[in-house]
Structure formats: C-alpha cells, structure tokens
Image (cartoon, rainbow, N blue to C red):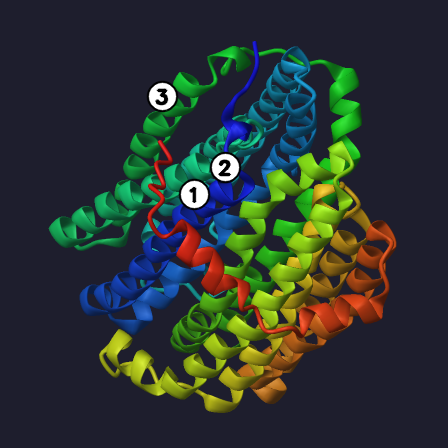
Amino acid sequence: MQINNFNDSFKSRIAKGVSANVFCQIVTILIQVVSVPLFIHYWGVGLYGEWLVLSAIPAYLTLIEFGFANSASNEMTKAVSSNLLSLASSVYRSAWSMVTTLCSILVVSLLFGVNSIDISPLFNIEKLSEDTAIILSLFLIQVFFIIQCQTLWPALKCNGLYATAAFLSGIVRIIEFVVCILFLVVFNTPLMAAVGILIGRILGFVLALYITYSKNNWLLIGQFSVDFKIVRKLFPSAIGFSAIPMASLCLIQGLTIIVSATLGPTLVVVFTVSRTLSRIAFQIADKLKDTLWPDTTRNINKGNISSVISTLFKLMQFNVWIIAILLVLLFLLSDEIIYFWTSGTVDLDKQFFIILLLALYLNTIWNSLSLILLATSNHKFVSYLNLFLALLLLSTSSFLADRFGLVGIAAGLLFIDFMMLPFIVVRVVRILDIEIKGLLLNSLIFPSWILKFNRKNRNDKCEVL
C-alpha cells in the first residue's frame, strides 16, 4: 500500500494548506469579533472578565498532551515518505495511547481537586464564585476532547492531508462556538455557556474522528497499543515540543491571570482585546509556517536542502514585508477597530499597544525561522529557552504590572522576543549550512513571488476533503 496524497505538486499542497488556514483565520477572527461584544452585552465587562480568567486556567491542561502529537507527526511523516506504513501506524498508536492515558489520569485528578478546594478568592472571582467549581469541571472535560482532537491531526498531516487537518480544526471550532452562543443567548449564564462549549467540542470531535478514520483506516485509530521503544524515542522531542505551548500559555493565559489578580478583571478585558487584535498578524504567519512544516520535514528527510532553503527565504520575505505592513495598518486603525468591536466599552492604551506590536513583529520573525528547528526536531534548546524567559516574565509580571501597568507587561514581552531571535538565527544557519548575511539579505527582498503564485493558483480548486 502506498500513500498518494504527496503526488500533488508542492505548490498545489501549499495552496490547499493556505486556503484551509485562511478559512481557519477567518473563523478565529469571526469568533473573536463576535464573542467580545456579545459576551459584554449579555454579562457586562466585570462578569466577562471573570469568565476570561476561569477559561484561562484549564487552558494549561492542553499541555497534558506533552508534545507527543508534534513529535509523532514528524516521525510519521518520515516513515510515510519512506513508505514504512507499519512503522507510522505503530508511532501513532503509541503516541495516542500514552496521551490518552496521561490525560485521563490528570483530568480525573483535577476534577476531584477543583471540587474540593475553593479557588475563587485566589483569582478575585466574586460574581462567579458559586459556580466556579462546576464551570472549571466542564472546562476540564472539554480539555480532554481538545487533546483527543490534537492527536487526530498527525494522522492526516503525515500523508499530505495537512489542509484537511487545518480545515477540520476550523470546523470543530465553529461547532463549539455556535453551540456555546446558542446556550448563551437562551440561558444567559456562564454555567450554561460552559455546557454549550463542552457539547460543541464533543460534537466536533465525533465529526473529526469519523473523517480522519475514513481517510486513514490503515492507522488503526483508537487501538490501544504502546511500543515503549517508540515512546522512548519520541519522548525527548515531545518534551521539547510541550515547552512551546507551555511558554505560550504562560505569556497569554498566565499573564491574563496575573493582570486580573494585580489590576482587576476590567483591565483583563483591555489586555485581552489588545492582545487579540495585535496577534492577528502573528496567527497568519504561524499558520503559513504550519502549512510548510510537513513538506519541510519530508524534503529534509529526502535530502532536498536547496528546496528547504528556498522555502525558508520566501517565508521570511513574507514576514519582513507583508506582516510589517499589516502591523502598521493595525496600529493606524486600532482605535476604530476596538471602538466598533467593543461598542465603545473598551479604551485602547496606545503606548501599551505599540509595544505589543513591536514584540509581535519580532515574535513572528523568530517563530517562522523555527520552522527548520521544528521540522528537524532540533527545537529543544530554544523551546526550553523560550519557556525559561516566559516563566521569568511571569514571576516578575506582578511587579511590572503594579509598577508600570499594562506597559510593563508589554515591555517584558518585547524583551523575550528580542532575546529569542539571535539564538534561533544561529541554529538555523548552522543546520542549513548558510551564512547569516545570506539569510538577512534574502529575507529583505520584496516578495514579488506572491503575485506570481496567486496568478498560477487562482483557478485551482482547493478541495481539502
């Protein structure tokens, strides 16, 4: 048996992946644009701020996956590119079995914990104090199904169906959001909104499971089997991968909790709205990097280094020029966007916002460069460095927020991204055997190839399912 999904041209696969990610980005933007004014309308800024804090706490539990999905995806892509399907299947089953076991144990333990200890005073939760335990319990169960979805995507990515995985992730989010909003409108309580989120996630997972199995029945999805030799091989890389979302959670949900505890729930909304708007450009670049990841792993495995270098240069050109233009537009239109988005209930702190944009630009640059490290499983050092810097900021964020307000938090984020960039550049040029000067000069070239790419692919049908 052979997998034929890689027989499509590279440009065709990228076009499909980009189309699927554009869809996901539209979904993300629509959810953010709709949810903020809707929740504020029904609950007010104070109650919505407490909801944001509660929803941030369980987000840490997505780390229960421990990076096994990404680690398995790399190994499965290598195996499939060499037509070693039995090895790819063993890797998938071992990773899924480990993740499911760890996830089940930790979720059950935490369910017992949140129902035994009142944590609402710790995070200034007042209006939701009576329902805190139940809401957190619902979020914990939701996290289990989020992680189950995450373990499905490697099964699609490894054989050239990245676009399908991206498209499905967007569909699952739509289902989850629509059901949540229905429960919000009908019942108008945070508790029932949490119920809606859980029901929506379960429905989305069932759909994703059905489609993934129909396209990958050779993987024996759902069969519990652990090969400890494979697990030991995956483990170091997986831990490195887990440090990436852990750092991200520290810098997003962690800072959200600190801002709430230090500055109050009202400024949590200001922080969240500003951060969400500033990250639009980053999300676009990050999705493009994810689209290129499976093919980069495959090309490196086959020794096509020149193709990898060419792809990296184009990715960097996109970031240096297109993302910079987008960030400038976001700054110029920020007042109007936030006024329309929040119906005038949230005031933008311009100084805070411009520092956020500068940090996001550096973040976008080094995050895209990390494609080479991720595709070759050479990400461990920079992942741990990013996590260390994130924890350092988290440990000092109360002081920064108390002394300098939101501007202090933004300055801390800028410091982290400034520190990360040179470490990643040095490792990337070493892996690809290129010069830093060459990387810099090629990155500064205006990406005129975008126009050629669009003309060639504008009539393609991006059928991802």
- Is residue 416 in sight in this rendering? no
Q: In this view, does 61 lie above or below 93?
A: below
Q: Name the residue under label 2.
A: 162
Q: In which quarter of the image is residue 366?
A: bottom right
Q: Mark 3 or mark 1: which comes first in sequence?
A: 1
Q: Which amino acid does label 3 sit on?
A: Tyr
Closest to the observer, 160 or 283: 160
Q: Where is residue 416 in the image (x, y as percent from the top left)?
A: 71, 71
For the residues bearing labels 1 and 2, Cβ distance under 8 angstroms:
yes
Q: Where is residue 54 in the image (x, y as percent from the top left)?
A: 42, 55
308 relative position to 54: left or right: right
The residue located at (48%, 83%) in the rendering is: 328
Q: Which mark is residue 210?
A: 3
Label 3, secondary structure: give it: helix
Q: In this view, does 3 lie above or below 304?
A: above
| Label 3 – label 1 distance at C-alpha | 21 Å
Q: Name the residue under label 1.
A: 16
Closest to the observer, 333 or 78: 78
Q: Mark 1 or mark 2: which comes first in sequence?
A: 1
Q: What residue type is labelled 2?
A: Tyr
Q: Where is residue 241 in the image (x, y as percent from the top left)?
A: 69, 43
Quadrant of the snapshot with the N terminus: top right
The residue located at (54%, 82%) in the rendering is: 406
- Is residue 284 in sight in this rendering? yes
